[in-house]
Amino acid sequence: MNLPDVLRRHRLLAVVRGDDPDAALASVLALAEVGIALVEVSLTSRDEAGVLVRARAALGPDAPLGAGTVLTESDVVQAEQAGASFVVTPGLVPAVAEAVRLGLPVLVGALTPTEVVAASLAGAAAVKLFPASLGGPAYLRALREPFPDVPFVPFGGVDVESAPEYLSAGAVAVGASESLLGTAPQGGDLAALRLRATAFRAALS
């Protein structure tokens, strides 16, 4: 799997995290119904492995399904066994080396230029710019001057209004959690989720 190409093609990575496994799975499937196929299930979710297993079974073997908030070597192994095709970390943690060793693409969290360099040297397939809200699209644009070839994916505070601005600033995709999912992964309104997802797709088209 070429993660940068997948990110460029889909443009939006939906981050699902919640304490209700059935609702989290329903959220993943609702996103897929409206055409948002690139999804990350956070390992901070309740029964995250079970959600990943069931999501993989429902979405099929080729869907780009990730595991997020991956920290340790054992997290990577668990994510891969559950069906994740890539992993996402909040920073340069032990999971990065293990994912690279297993050939599992990894989206590594970074904020500063030093962290971007470290993530790239560690084998990151792409860099999760987090929290992107600290500097906004202007900061991403400034980062891309010394790092024009790094695939950046802003996370943290990205909403339907700012998402296109990040893409214009050079992001290959954006990550969205609460602004997209709302309370759906906790058992909230799936119809409202579908409406927000449709609005995101329109904004990024």
Image (cartoon, helix red, strand yellow):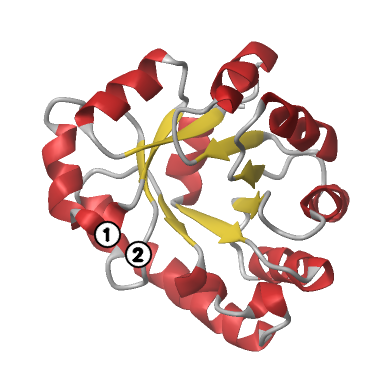
Residue at screen point 55% across, 59% down: 14
Q: Which amino acid does the dot numbered 2 rest on?
A: Gly
Alpha-carbon span between mark 2 and mark 1 = 5 Å
Q: Position of residue 180 (x, y in %)?
A: 50, 71
Q: Is residue 72 above or below residue 33?
A: above
Which numbered marker is on residue 157?
2
**Which of 149/68 is in front?**
68
Tell me the residue at 28%/61% (across/down).
Answer: 164
Quarter of the rendering containing residue 171? top left
The reply to whether dot 2 and dot 1 touch (C-beta < 8 Å) is yes
In the depicted structure, whether residue 20 falls above or below residue 87: below
**Where is residue 72 drawn, in percent x and y?**
65, 30
Q: Is residue 41 above or below residue 203?
A: above
Q: Residues within 10 Å of mark 2 (few under 14, many from 20)?
A: some
Horizontal and vertical percent position of residue 108? 46, 33
Residue that carries the numbered disc 1 in the rendered image:
133
Who's the residue at 74% across and 28% down the image?
74
